[in-house]
Amino acid sequence: MPTTIAKLDVSPAKSTAEPRRSRTSGIDRALQILDYLQKAERPATAYEIARDIGAPLSTIYVIVDDLVEKELLDRQDGGLLWLGPRLYHYGLTYARTLDLLNVAVQEMHELAQSSGETIQICGRDGDHMVVLAMEEGKDHFQVTSRVGTRSPLNWTASGRMLIGHLPEAERREIFARSATTSPTGRAETDKNVLARTAAAALEQGLSIQAGESDFSVACIAAPVCDTQGACRATISIVVPDVKLKQKDPDLIALVKTSARRIEARLGWHGRG
């Protein structure tokens, strides 16, 4: 009788184990929700949030209920969700610990008095400029950008200066991914032009834009730089564009002086 020889299978064994799926922690989901609302700048439903951040709706419902209970979210009419009052209190406490913002706000009040115009303190939030503080002028000129408003860096005089100290390649990379067309269609979007003008504005200690983000609105901004020459914030005067060339008072001189005073009060090296 012929002998049957069994063949030994030496091929790699196939794993029957399920591939491990990455899991998003509860705190990460909570941050995604808060980040979404901050960027949207409007209340949203749990469904909208879940859809746009790519999370299971059931998971978002559970986390939302917990955040609402802890006053980190506020549930409004129709089930709309918005940032809760507890976040405001955290923000106030955090703001009090920031020497830069405290000093800048003091100077903002003084500049508002001396110029009679609307003053803003702005900083950088990733690929955006954010209004950190604001005081309205005597004539109550209407400005659409309020405290907390975030705008693409290429739309504003302050936004460009805030990255003017970075290496040229990094400036181009930032503008390449973030520059967008402004509501007026007048904001520059070419990454190379923006990279050059950002550095030039910081070097000059002054950036002016008129009608780039809002029709008939002009902004005169000066940088606040630390001891390393990095632009940490800007102080700016927001006026109707017809006031750009006025000399009494001289708005350009006032805003540049205010920026230097902030640097001096913080012990940073002032620039000429």
Image (cartoon, rainbow, N blue to C red):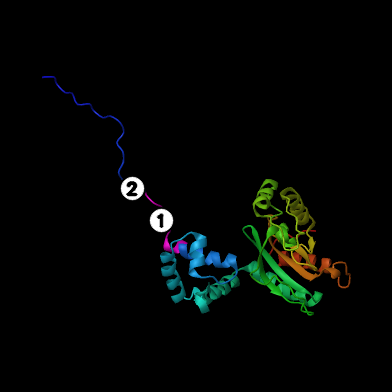
SS for callout 1: loop
**In the image, is residue 77 above or below residue 213?**
below
**Relative to the observer, which residue lies in front, 48 or 204?**
48
Residue 124 in the image: x percent, y percent? 65, 61
Give the crowd class for mark 1: few <14, some 14-19, many >=20 residues within 10 Å. few
The residue that disc 1 covers is 23
Work out whether 138 lies above or below 149. Answer: below
Identified by mark 2, the residue type is Glu
Rendered position, 180 above or below 71: above
Residue 97 numbered tag: none
Q: Which residues are magenta?
A: 20-28
Q: Position of residue 224 (x, y in %)?
A: 71, 62
Q: Does residue 231 appear left or right of residue 90 in this picture?
A: right
Residue sitting at 64 percent across and 52 percent down? 177
The residue mark sitting in front, 2 or 1, is 2
Quadrant location of residue 180?
Answer: bottom right
Residue occupied by mark 2: 18
Q: Residue at horizontal 75%, vertical 65%?
A: 259
Question: For the stretch drawn in magenta, what is the main secondary structure?
Answer: loop
Point out the tag, 2 or 1, that comes first from the N-terminus: 2
Relative placement, left or right, of 219 versus 230 is: right
Q: Are marks 2 and 1 in contact (CB under 8 Å)?
A: no
Amino acid under label 1?
A: Arg
Q: Position of residue 111 (x, y in %)?
A: 77, 73
Q: Residue furthest front?
A: 1
Q: Work out whether residue 33 or residue 127 is closer to the camera in this orientation and state it.
A: 33
Q: For numbered disc 2, what is the local secondary structure?
A: loop
